[in-house]
Amino acid sequence: MIFWNSFADFIAMGGYGGYVWGSFGMAALIMVMEPILVVRRRTQTIARLKRQARAEARNSSE
C-alpha cells in the first residue's frame, strides 16, 4: 500500500508527477473533446446531406 506524507508528495508521485498528471490530463481532455467532436461532425454531415438532397432534387426537376 502507498502512503504519502503530504499533499505535495501525492502530487509529486515519487518524482513521476509530471508524467502521471500529464497523462491523466491528456486522457481527461480527450474524453471531454471526443463527444463534442462527434456531435459537431454529425451536425455537419446532416447539413451536407440535406444540401446534396436539395441539389439532386433541383437537378432531377430540370
Image (tube, rainbow, N blue to C red):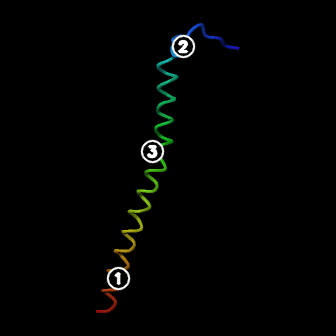
- The C terminus lies in which quarter of the figure? bottom left
Disc 3 on helix, strand or loop? helix
Look at discs 2 and 3 and give the one toward the viewer. 2
Q: Is 1 in front, or is 16? A: 1
Residue linked to disc 3: 33
State the residue lying farthest toward the top.
5
Q: Residues within 10 Å of mark 3 (few under 14, many from 20)?
A: few
Three-letter amino acid code at disc 1?
A: Glu
Task: Report whether 40 appears left or right of 13.
Answer: left
Three-letter amino acid code at disc 3?
A: Met
Q: Is 55 placed above or below 2 here?
A: below
Disc 1 on helix, strand or loop? helix
Closer to the N terminus: mark 3 or mark 1?
3
Q: Residue 50: horizontal and vertical position, in percent? A: 38, 74
Question: Marks 2 and 3, how far apart in space?
Answer: 29 Å
Three-letter amino acid code at disc 2?
A: Phe
Q: Residues within 10 Å of mark 1 (few under 14, many from 20)?
A: few
